[in-house]
Image (cartoon, helix red, strand yellow):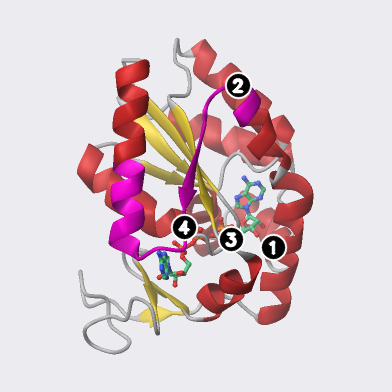
Amino acid sequence: MPLDLILLGPPGAGKGTQAKILSQRLGIPHVASGDLFRDHLHRQTPLGQLARQYMDRGELVPDDVTIGMIRERLEQADCRNGVILDGFPRTPAQAQALDELLAGMGRSLAAVLYIRVRNELLLRRLAGRWTCRVCGAVYHIEFNPPRVPGRCDLDGGPLYQREDDTEEVQRRRIQVYQEQTAPLVSFYRERGLLVEIDGECSIPEVTEELIRAIEVRKAVDP
Ligand code: ADP
Ligand code: ADP
């Protein structure tokens, strides 16, 4: 049975960081809607140009565009054994569409891993976030610095700060999360899929908590 997981949580909770580690450990791809949009932006596709208007302001890209992009990604061959979704779904309509997409493939969610971090910590995390231009690996100037300043540990690629990581846009993204995405916590809790993870521990501690939670879910619903 494919292992389909969602990492849910506010901007800066550590979803991308953990998704990359879990993807390696579990051998299933990391599907991040933000990364897919950034890739379109970089390639200057019409979808990228449309998405940019929203991303620059910290607003959500419209559901139909986002859902279409994820559908295309999930249909690719490497997703057949499962996916780790990061940043999607972000609205109830996206959650509904995901259910239908997976059902159409004869699949269903194994778990929704909700990484909890207090608001005060989120801004500190986002302000110090540096990302590898080549592979997308994520660092933190204070909490997870690269071995060589400004260079990725994995491939030596240059690190950059995302354009939407200005303080104003960060605050807006957190607000948008509270308004539009936080309702998904109770949506998935009611379906018995939600597992709460303390996201304020160190990166390896959060990983271990996630792995334990996934093992428990797999035992319940193999
Ligand atoms: P998200 O994908 O949820 O927005 P990221 O994975 O990009 O979050 O993490 C945001 C920032 O916080 C990054 O700079 C990352 O290095 C850092 N970070 C992630 N997890 C932790 C943690 N457990 N403790 C301290 N810093 C962390
Ligand atoms: P973060 O890790 O800081 O939360 P993301 O990389 O997930 O940021 O998202 C960056 C931006 O991409 C969002 O502010 C939004 O404009 C757009 N985006 C990403 N995922 C979605 C989604 N599921 N629905 C709508 N917009 C999205």
Q: Earlier in the sequence, mark 4 or mark 2?
A: 2
Question: Within 10 angstroms of label 3, few (less than 14), some, or many (20 or more) residues?
Answer: many
Question: Within 10 angstroms of label 1, few (less than 14), some, or many (20 or more) residues?
Answer: some
- Residue 132: percent from left, percent from top: 35, 72
Label 3, label 1: how far apart the Cα atoms are: 6 Å
Q: Of circles 2 and 1, which is in front? A: 2
Q: Of circles 1 and 4, which is in front? A: 4
Q: Earlier in the sequence, mark 3 or mark 1?
A: 3
Q: Is residue 167 above or below residue 184?
A: below
Confirm or reject: label 3 Cβ below 8 Å from ligand 2: yes
Residue type highlighted by circle 4 = Gly
Q: Which residues are magenta?
A: 189-211
- Residue 163: percent from left, percent from top: 59, 76
On the rendered structure, is 195 left or right of 180? Answer: left
Name of the residue lying farthest toward the right: 179
Question: Can residue 9 be spotted in the picture?
Answer: yes
Confirm or reject: label 4 Cβ below 8 Å from ligand 1: yes
> Mark 1 = which residue?
174
Return the mark for residue 11: 3
Say which residue appears at 63% left-offset and 73% top-offset: 120
Confirm or reject: label 1 Cβ below 8 Å from ligand 2: no
Residue 191 is a magenta residue: yes
On the rendered structure, is 129 left or right of 45? Answer: left
Label 2, label 3: how far apart the Cα atoms are: 24 Å
Report helix, strand or loop for mark 3.
loop
- Residue 38: percent from left, percent from top: 52, 59
Label 2, label 1: how far apart the Cα atoms are: 25 Å
Q: Of circles 2 and 3, which is in front? A: 2
Q: Is residue 192 above or below residue 142?
A: above
